[in-house]
Image (cartoon, rainbow, N blue to C red):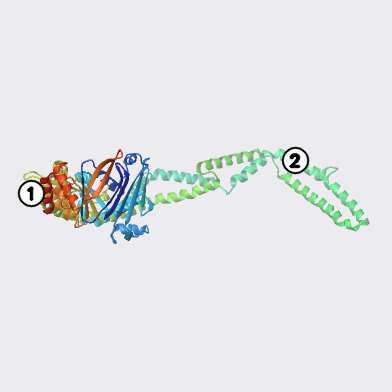
Amino acid sequence: MLQELTIRNFAIIDDLSIRFHPGFTILSGETGAGKSIIINAVNLLLGSPAAGGNRLVRTGADSAELEALFEVPAQSPVARLMAEDDCDPRDGLIIRRIISATGRNRVYINSRLSTMKRLNELTGSLASISGQHAHQGLLNEEGHLDILDQFGSLTGLREQVRKCHGGILPLLEKLKTLRAKQLRQTEQMDLLRFQQQEILDAAIEPDEDAALEKERTILRNAEALYRLVYEGLEALYNDEDAVVARLVEVARRLEKACEIDPDLAPRAQGVSDAAFQVEDIAEGLRTYLQTVRIDDRRLEEIEARLDALQKLKRKYGGALADVQARLVAIGAELSSIENIDEEIRRTESALAGHHRDLAALAADLSAKRKETARKLAEKVEAELDTLKMADTRFEVVVAPLPAGDGVPVYLRAGDAAIAADGMDRAGFMIAPNVGEALKPLAAIASGGELSRVVLALKAILARTESVETVIFDEVDAGVGGGVAEVVGRKLASLSDFHQVICITHLPQIAKFADHHFRIAKHVQGGRTRTTIDPLSPEDRLQEIARMLGGVDVTRATLDHAREMLEGR
């Protein structure tokens, strides 16, 4: 239930606060006083987008601030959502929305910064506003199915259909992909097998390219390599003044020196050992020289092999390891393609099972809708009879959803398509006058008739609608006199199930209210501002008289107003 509403710097409202109560509340006032602004503020607090945010902010202010306090029933969906956010529902739900003149806006829920998504989740079952938009919505047949399902308590079954339908969609996409692969199967397998054989024929060894590049470098520089090693060998061993000969001479001299000082023996032995080591190195160089050869044929073979390996690397990866990895992947792809027929059969089998479940659920929902349609039509006719639309015929037509050529067989039931909300479409048909044929509601209903159909549906759905607060704007469109009084009585009866807040110009409706507020516009300090005041019994008498007679309230008008209030 909406308990408090605060509006600051919003349109022509500078600072306004309203405390609401259970029951039936009327908001009245002159045209242009700001009644629609209040409805707009509540809409924004319920999660509507702030289109044209800078135009919503009062001239001269940086931002507009809207705040509402809702009482939350303990076991309601809102209470469960609040508990998820670690908020105590017993403290109520406080929604605060700040709209900047720059167009940015912020949402706070119980003093915590929140998101529009969360706001819409919380407010979905808090309140509903039935105004010009609701009237237009009733003309849109897409919403008729929702009303039918709500009346018949079919939303649970409808949710089962939605989930089953949702389970089929990814399987359909998978089947589509598999069949597309199947069409390309022969061509793709030929390509993969060619690639596989190409890599296998190459007989690649690990790090083969690095080893070949090293050998190629040696072959390209064989002459220089032979000359350098040979010159080194000559200097170490073969020259007259070779390193080995000089080391042997030094070792001989140090041996003589050891006769004088035996402590030199280790040094002398070291030089002798060095001479032997150099001899070993020289022998190794002789052996190495025998391996160095100039082989143009081998160089050509290496060049060709490296070129072949480079082409494979360019085609299948940047390194030989990548080429080998591609070979493994090709094997897996071939195995997958070879099993594609079996995968298609498994997917089709799964789809057939889902389709059986979906078709059964959709058929059950459709049958219940048709029975519900008959009951709803009877109740609407009865309600319209109490709203001065006697002998009006009303019918809810439930027809199969047509299946076009593009609808998959798994989303069909006979000639009907099965959508996420079932296999039906619904339409409200009405004949307000005796002897007329039933026609779509949008085709023939006048403003007053449409208002009463909306009210009739609200009255019927009162016991099933989950919202705590129902706000009516322009419910009196096209009605007056005795019809208006009947509408007022119906609104009062709705307040047995919901908190009802109604904006009206008609005293015949206002007289039934439990609480009455007057909205007025004043000029103060060169600025227009809107005020809202709860009315005492005497003030209410004056307001009803104003609604009856206009600006000049006469004694007769007051007496008429008093009579209306006493006779409600």
Q: Residues within 10 Å of mark 1 (few under 14, many from 20)?
A: some
Residue 267 in the figure: left or right of residue 374: right
Q: 403 or 428, which lies in front? A: 428
**Residue with the mark numbered 2:** 228
Q: Quadrant of residue 57?
A: top left
Q: Quadrant of residue 125?
A: bottom left
Q: Nearer the viewer, mark 1 or mark 2?
A: 1
Q: Please state the horizontal and vertical placement of residue 439, each as a whole percent of the image.
A: 13, 43
At 45% from the left edge and 51% from the top edge, which residue is drawn?
332
Q: Earlier in the sequence, mark 1 or mark 2?
A: 2
Q: 432 or 343, which lies in front? A: 432
At 23% from the left edge and 40% from the top edge, which residue is drawn?
32
Whether label 1 touches label 2, CB < 8 Å: no
Q: Amino acid at mark 2?
A: Leu
Q: Please state the horizontal and vertical placement of residue 104, each as a whole percent of the image.
A: 37, 43
For the residue labelled by badge 1, is the local secondary structure a helix, a strand or a loop?
A: loop
Q: Please state the horizontal and vertical placement of residue 462, each as a whole percent of the image.
A: 19, 55
Q: Residues within 10 Å of mark 2 (few under 14, many from 20)?
A: few
For the residue labelled by badge 2, is the local secondary structure a helix, a strand or a loop?
A: helix
Q: Is residue 167 visible?
A: no
Q: Amino acid at mark 1?
A: Asp
Q: 453 or 226, which lies in front? A: 453
Q: Is residue 293 visible?
A: yes
Q: Residue furthest front?
A: 555
**CA gap, disc 1 to disc 2?**
120 Å
Q: Quadrant of the N terminus?
A: bottom left
**Residue with the mark numbered 1:** 391
Q: Please state the horizontal and vertical placement of residue 13, each as a whole percent of the image.
A: 29, 43
